[in-house]
Each structure stands twice: as structure tokens, then as C-alpha cells.
Image (spheres, rainbow, N blue to C red):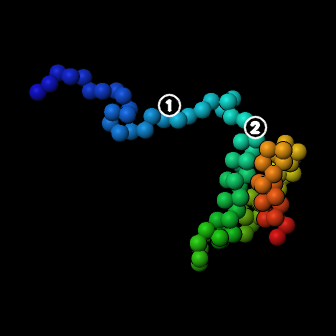
């Protein structure tokens, strides 16, 4: 038997060190926040349209419409900011919203 104190180091037990992986929100550039939200809205809309897998049970066109409208508003409102940084996101969103 040993009198050793168990280690409190998270890496010692194989658990990830979440404190080291997190960032202060003040350190995240606005363009990164905007594009991350756009990707989440786009992904959620795709799932609600039933595009996540063939014969999807998650079809809710009303919810998809709301998400697409929110995405359109976000892209429209931030287009001048994100087009300089991430033009591909703007083009992708425009294609999805128009087609």
C-alpha cells in the first residue's frame, strides 16, 4: 500500500485538459465568430431539409426556412466584413440561398 496522493493533473488520467483548449471570447476575431455561426445555421438547415442522410426522419421545412432566413440576414448584414476575409463562405451561402 502506498501513501502517495493521487495526481490532480488531468493529463495523468488520460482526460483532455479543457482549460488549455479553451479561448477567451475576447480573443476570438469577429469574422471567426460570424463564420462559425453561419456554418452552424447552414448545417442545422441542411438537417431540417432532410439532407443529413437518405430517408431522413428530420424533415421540418418550416424550421429549415427559419434557419435559412437567419443565415441570409447574418450573411447580408456582415457581407462587407466577411467578404474581405472569407469570400468563399459568402459565395457558398449565396448559392444555397438562391438555389
Which quarter shows the C terminus? bottom right
Q: Which residue reaches farthest bottom?
A: 55
**Image-based side of 70 in relation to 21, left or right:** right
Label 2 element class: helix
Q: Is residue 26 visible?
A: yes
Residue position marked by numbered label 1 in the rendering: 19
Question: Between residues 13 and 63, which one lies in front from this camera angle?
Answer: 13
Q: Position of residue 63 (x, y in %)?
A: 72, 63
Which quadrant of the figure has residue 5?
top left
Count of numbered labels shown in the rendering: 2
Q: Position of residue 62 (x, y in %)?
A: 74, 66
Residue position marked by numbered label 2 in the rendering: 30
Distance, label 1 to label 2, CA atoms, is: 22 Å
Q: Earlier in the sequence, mark 1 or mark 2?
A: 1
Q: Residues within 10 Å of mark 2 (few under 14, many from 20)?
A: few
Q: Residues within 10 Å of mark 1 (few under 14, many from 20)?
A: few
Which quarter shows the N terminus? top left
- Residue drawn at the location 53% of the way across and 35% of the way down: 21
Q: Position of residue 19 (x, y in %)?
A: 50, 31
Vertical side of 36 occupied by 54: above or below: below
Q: Is residue 71 visible?
A: no
Which quadrant of the figure has residue 31?
top right
Question: Between residues 83 and 42, which one lies in front from this camera angle?
Answer: 83
Vertical side of 77 occupied by 55: above or below: below
Amino acid at each position: 500500500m502506498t501513501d502517495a496522493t493521487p495526481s490532480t493533473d488531468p493529463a495523468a488520467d488520460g482526460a483532455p485538459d479543457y482549460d488549455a483548449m479553451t479561448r477567451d471570447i475576447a480573443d476570438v476575431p469577429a469574422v471567426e465568430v460570424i463564420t462559425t455561426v453561419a456554418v452552424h445555421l447552414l448545417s442545422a438547415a441542411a438537417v431540417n431539409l432532410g439532407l443529413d442522410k437518405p430517408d431522413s426522419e428530420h424533415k421540418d421545412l418550416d424550421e429549415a426556412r427559419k434557419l435559412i432566413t437567419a443565415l441570409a440576414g447574418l450573411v447580408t448584414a456582415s457581407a462587407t466584413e466577411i467578404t474581405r476575409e472569407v469570400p468563399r463562405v459568402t459565395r457558398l451561402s449565396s448559392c444555397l440561398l438562391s438555389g
